[in-house]
Amino acid sequence: MSSMFRCCIALCAAFLAACAAGPAVAPAPAFELAGRVAVRFQDRGFVSAVRWKQNGGSDEIWLTAPLGQTIAYLQADAAGAMLTAADQKQYRASSIESLTRSALGWRFPVAGMRYWVLGQPAPGMALAAVERNDAGRITRLRQDDWQVAFNYVAESLVPSRLEIVGGDAEIRFVIDNWTPGPP
């Protein structure tokens, strides 16, 4: 076999291997937001102010009481998630979703919300349905076991409110201030 032929075979094999691996999911764009979250789950409820810093592959989320005391501080990256409670107890899990489920009793769908707060479907999650308004912005979607309704203020490109329902949880997420992060 000629070296040119072997080189072509090697390139084809590398190309096919890359295709078989599937497209890589790009990290969510960086942002920082402040708002409020209200959660109803089973026969309980939870209300908090929220501050969220998303930087590509990591999240920092502060849930605070009305007078500003931190109820929970969540950190997550590819290595896992950690929740620090008001009493400084720390809890660890593989994801924020599983961590909030075990520590708070409800699942906070951060993997999807990283994109939903931008008015986009989340890559890597099963997309069952999408509805858009006349301006092309998403107004409703179903991904995995979550149903999300989006509300926008005037011509804003990002939603001002999300209503999220999944499993036994109903989450109302209001975005009061949203700032894009560095590219």
Image (cartoon, grey):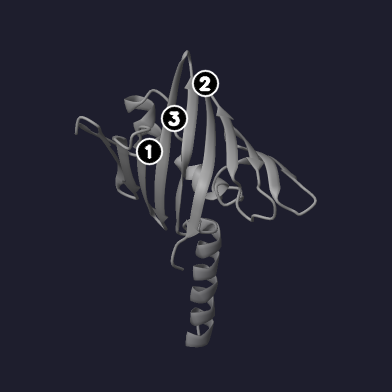
Q: Which residue is identified by label 3?
A: 107
Residue 54 vs residue 13: left or right?
A: left
**Label 1 crowd (10 A; few <14 / some 14-19 / many >=20):** many
Q: Earlier in the sequence, mark 2 or mark 1?
A: 1
Q: Is residue 141 left or right of residue 9?
A: right
Residue denoted by label 1: 96
The amino acid type, in three-letter code, at marker 2 is: Asp
C-alpha gap between disc 3 and disc 2: 9 Å
Badge 2: how crowded within 10 Å, few (<14), some, or many (20+)?
few
Q: Secondary structure at mark 3?
A: loop
Tell me which residue sits at (65%, 42%) in the image: 151
- Among numbered discs 3 and 2, the one appearing first in the sequence: 3
Along the line of sight, which residue is nearer the eye, 177 or 81?
177
Mark 2 element type = loop
Label 3 packing within 10 angstroms: few (<14), some (14-19), many (20+): many
User: Residue 56: where, in percent of width, then height?
Assistant: 42, 58
Residue at the (48%, 74%) spot, across then down = 10
Q: CA distance from mark 3 to mark 1?
A: 8 Å
Element type at mark 1: helix
Q: Is residue 93 left or right of residue 176?
A: left
Q: Which residue is mark 2?
A: 168
Q: Position of residue 66 (x, y in %)?
A: 38, 32
- What is the x, y in percent for residue 146? 58, 33
Q: Rounded to the nearest whole Å, what is the CA distance between mark 2 and mark 1?
A: 17 Å
